[in-house]
Amino acid sequence: MSLLPDWNYLQMERHSFLGIVCLILLAVAEIGSHMYGSRSSFLIGEAARLAGLQRIADETAAKKQSDAEASQLRERLAEAQAVVAAAKANADELRRRAEPRHLGDGEKAVIGRMLAGQPKGKLVIKASASVQDARAFLSLSGWGKLQIAGAVPMHTQS
């Protein structure tokens, strides 16, 4: 027997060594694949978690915007209601002003006292034709004869 192995033995050793190296590389690849698969599952889970957080943030932002718009609409409604109230008050004032004038009992009494010491006769009250409610005003007073003239109202006594 010789101290040196023959060529076939060395060639067989080399193949075994290469087989062992390939087996080790295969094990490393399998471990890497398993780690990558775990990482992939982790990344998918994180993506789902981040999508949920983003959805919540979007809903919160939409609710804030909706609340802000509702607040603005409430303010505009309050302003509009104030304008309507002012318009109603103005309309009431205009209606009150447009009503025909009339002499109150106190005013009739004052005029009656003023004329009480005067000689008896016919009372003629002249009213301007440009004053729309003059005829109604004088006819409601129940006094004298009404004459519509182009002049300013005058009180005369005959």
Image (cartoon, helix red, strand yellow):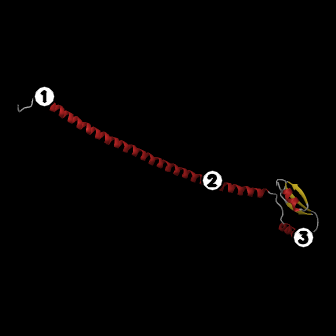
Q: Name the residue nearer the viewer: 113 or 38.
A: 38
Residue 34 vs residue 114: left or right?
A: left
- Secondary structure of the residue carrying tag 2 is helix
Q: Is residue 127 visible?
A: no
In which quadrant is the N terminus drawn?
top left
Residue 29 in the image: state x and y as whole percent.
28, 38
Residue linked to disc 2: 77
Q: Quadrant of the C terminus?
A: bottom right
* Residue type of the residue flagged with mark 1: Asn
Q: Where residue 116 is drawn, which disc sits there? A: 3
Q: Amino acid at mark 3?
A: Ala
Does the residue at mark 1 contact the one at mark 3 (Cβ under 8 Å)?
no
Q: Secondary structure at mark 1?
A: helix
Q: Mark 2 near mark 1, Cβ–Cβ under 8 Å? A: no
> Which of the two marks, 2 or 3, is nearer to us in this view?
2
As drawn, 94 above or below 105? above
Q: Which residue is mark 1?
A: 8
Quarter of the image holding residue 99?
bottom right
- Dividing the picture into quarters, in which one does residue 87 lie? bottom right
